[in-house]
Image (spheres, helix red, strand yellow):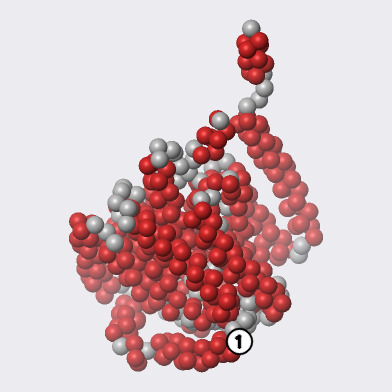
Amino acid sequence: MKMLSRDENSLNLPSGAAVRSAAGMAIICASALLLPLAIGFASAKLSSSNSLQGVILAGILFPAFLLALLKTRLLVPYTLLIWAVAPELRRIADWYEGVYHSVSLLSLAPLLTGATLAIPVLREIHRVRKSSTRILLLFSVALAYGAIIGLAKNGIGSVYDLANYIVPLLLIPFFAVTKFGPKDIDRLLYAFANIAVLVAIYGIVQYLTVPPWDAFWMNHADMMSIGTPYPLEIRVFSTLNSPGPAATFLVFALVPMILEPRWRGTLRWIGVMLVVVCLLTTLVRSAWLVLLVMLLVYIASSPSRGKWKSLLQLVFVAAALFWVVPKLPGAEGLVARVETLSDVQEDHSYNERLTLWTNMLPMVASNPVGQGIGSVGQGTKLGNGGELGEYGNMDNGVIALLLTFGILGALFFFGALGVVVKEIGARVLRKNELQPYARLALAAWMGAVASLVSDNGFPGLKGYLVWMLIGLGLSAAELTQSRKKGMPHAAVKRQVTSR
């Protein structure tokens, strides 16, 4: 009877899940009430220009916040969309106002949206595996070192650059604590393909018509390397902020699209061809080389039967391009750009990069401490009146990393990359149905390392794409390990609670 009474009393007590659910709803309701008030207060304090940017930024962030709390698996596709379209929203806002802003609040949209990944990570941080912890620890040492030097030498620019390193790296623990099964990973890559197709379609429209807001930006941004704002005379940047990031986004989506039907998106092969054509119009040759490296790595690590299938698909794409490209408007420029790959010794860009390596290496050797985070890239604008600093354009990723982290910090950074590829390699060797995700992670790692000949691809957009594909490969392997142990990927916490 006592036991029955105890059970009856326990029925009246709220379960842990109910308490967590009620707490989550309370947070959501409080946010829904406080956010409009915060927006209104901030808008009243800002200029009309910054007020518009602030409202757009808040409208972008609020869905990310809700997804982080409620639909965690949808958060990454949403952040991918924001990385893709935020620069275009910024251009439209500037064009609408008739004022060009070299530094805009909307530039923070991808970073702040990506930062919401920290919500599920902090909630389940105790479930991060040792392999992921080791990787994050090594990167943390390098970033902490670079941040300390950067704060001393570069001021506020180092904070922005540090965020560009940290936000992409959040994907490693995010995938480690979020239950992503094979179907979930396929849906994510499917969504990635669809976003890339939308970027490609807009890029082709941009190439043929040059919308007024894009022309406005080109006329004020003073980027002579992207052509002139007239149809067929532009290097396409689509919804991104320059041809390089646009090509990067398309390449990292195109590799899965070519290799596996389930990752191809709604338009299937039509989508593939649209992405390829748009990629060509960016005229970013380093991206084409990264594409080739990633495809070859994935194919080389595939089983024998899979190799032949993938090679046939590549032959199909190459044959279609051979037939389509000469028929495109402005095909002469595209063909001429491709032909430069056959004679790199005479290529101006290649010779400039070679000269950069020769001139910068002695300087790096004479400054082993490094310049710190914020000394290279877009972050130099913040401490330089909106203009790029001395090392704002650095066309060599290895030099950029050595210049940023110095000898000691670079050792930890490259050491972390070594641990990453070791973990991926162990997953690739396991023969199971989830091996394709590990091979895709290996291809992404090799593509990122190969791209160091042209730029440092680990912060910002490229870093986000690289760590997304790597994180998916590592989480798929951990799912396999959990199955072998007879335990679901997300069941560890529930098992402990039940005890």
Residue 476: % across, % down? 41, 50
What is the quadrant of the N terminus in the image? Answer: top right
Q: Quadrant of residue 373?
A: bottom right
Please report the residue visible at 19 percent of the width from the left and 56 percent of the height from the top.
305
Instruction: Classify 266 as above or below 404.
Output: above
Residue 377 visible in the current orientation: no
Residue 166: % across, % down? 59, 63
Please report the residue visible at 48 percent of the width from the left and 61 percent of the height from the top.
467
What is the quadrant of the C terminus in the image? Answer: top right
Numbered label tally: 1
Q: Is residue 402 left or right of residue 208?
A: right
Q: Is residue 89 left or right of residue 152?
A: left
Type of amino acid under label 1: Asn
Residue 233 visible in the current orientation: yes
Q: Quadrant of residue 2?
A: top right
Question: For this rendering, which residue is in front, 116 or 225?
Answer: 116
Please report the residue visible at 37 percent of the width from the left and 42 percent of the height from the top.
484
Tag 1 residue: 367
Please report the residue visible at 60 percent of the width from the left and 43 percent of the height from the top.
69
Question: For this rendering, which residue is in front, 195 or 132?
Answer: 132
Residue 391: % across, % down? 58, 83
Q: Quadrant of residue 281?
A: bottom left
